[in-house]
């Protein structure tokens, strides 16, 4: 919203600006499940596969809250487009979960779901989209994350770690892209400037 306010102040056409807010889904379960498995108790194992969807649901709740403010209303009246939550990393990382778990479950109005080709095919073959599966799950999402915390697993620390790892991976990928483009341009005799 701060960017839209700046764009509006600069006289830009807000109707031409579109954006998404990306949230990694399966990576949350991958990290928290690893820690739950190390604990190995029945209570810990019962929470496996729940943190990622809880995280997505609570992110959507924050999205709903942000876009129900007077600040947003003023921007929307000026033609601004609502930012859309984008679920990324929606392929399951192991055989213990159905291949469409992170597609079937985080369904809510205005969301975008990116998926690997294998997940896309699995969804086409046997995915079950039952409408909004997010907004009615806020209470359970909070309970699931409280359960993880009660076992001594810091949700905040996991999210911080995953954020740092994600930024590092994107930085590496960006540098590799820049290097490949520079190499291609240099091989064709084009100056880098």
Image (cartoon, rainbow, N blue to C red):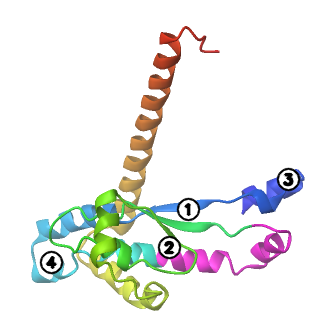
Q: Pointers 1 and 2 in contact (CB under 8 A)?
A: yes
Q: What's the residue at 46%, 87% (across, down)?
A: 131
Quadrant where the image shows the C terminus: top right
Q: Which residue is mark 2?
A: 59
3 or 1: tag closer to the N-terminus: 3
Q: Which residue is mark 1?
A: 21
Residue 184, position as x, y percentages in the image: 48, 18
Give the foreground label among 1 and 2: 1
Q: What's the residue at 32%, 82% (across, down)?
A: 144
Residue 73 falls within the magenta-colored stretch: yes
Q: Which residue is mark 4?
A: 45
Binning the other alpha carbons within 10 Å of mark 1 as few (below 14), some (14 to 19) or many (20 upward) gives some
Residue 163, position as x, y percentages in the image: 42, 53
Q: What's the residue at 44%, 46% (across, down)?
A: 167
Q: Which residue is mark 3?
A: 12
Binning the other alpha carbons within 10 Å of mark 3 as few (below 14), some (14 to 19) or many (20 upward) gives few
1 or 4: tag closer to the N-terminus: 1
């Amino acid at each position: 919203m701060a960017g839209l306010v700046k764009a509006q102040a600069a006289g830009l056409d807000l109707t031409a600006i579109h954006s998404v807010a990306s949230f990694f889904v399966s990576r949350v379960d991958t990290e928290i499940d690893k820690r739950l498995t190390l604990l190995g108790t029945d209570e810990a194992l019962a929470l496996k596969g729940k943190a990622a969807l809880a995280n997505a649901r609570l992110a959507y709740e924050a999205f709903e809250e942000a876009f129900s403010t007077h600040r947003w209303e003023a921007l929307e009246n000026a033609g601004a487009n609502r930012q859309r939550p984008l679920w990324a990393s929606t392929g399951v990382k192991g055989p213990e979960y159905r291949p469409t778990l992170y597609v079937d479950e985080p369904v809510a109005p205005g969301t975008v779901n990116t998926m690997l080709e294998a997940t896309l095919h699995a969804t086409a073959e046997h995915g079950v989209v039952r409408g909004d599966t997010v907004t009615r799950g806020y209470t359970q999402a909070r309970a699931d994350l409280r359960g993880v915390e009660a076992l001594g697993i810091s949700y905040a620390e996991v999210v911080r770690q995953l954020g740092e790892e994600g930024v590092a991976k994107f930085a590496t990928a960006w540098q590799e892209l820049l290097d490949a483009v520079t190499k291609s341009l240099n091989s064709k005799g084009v100056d880098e400037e």
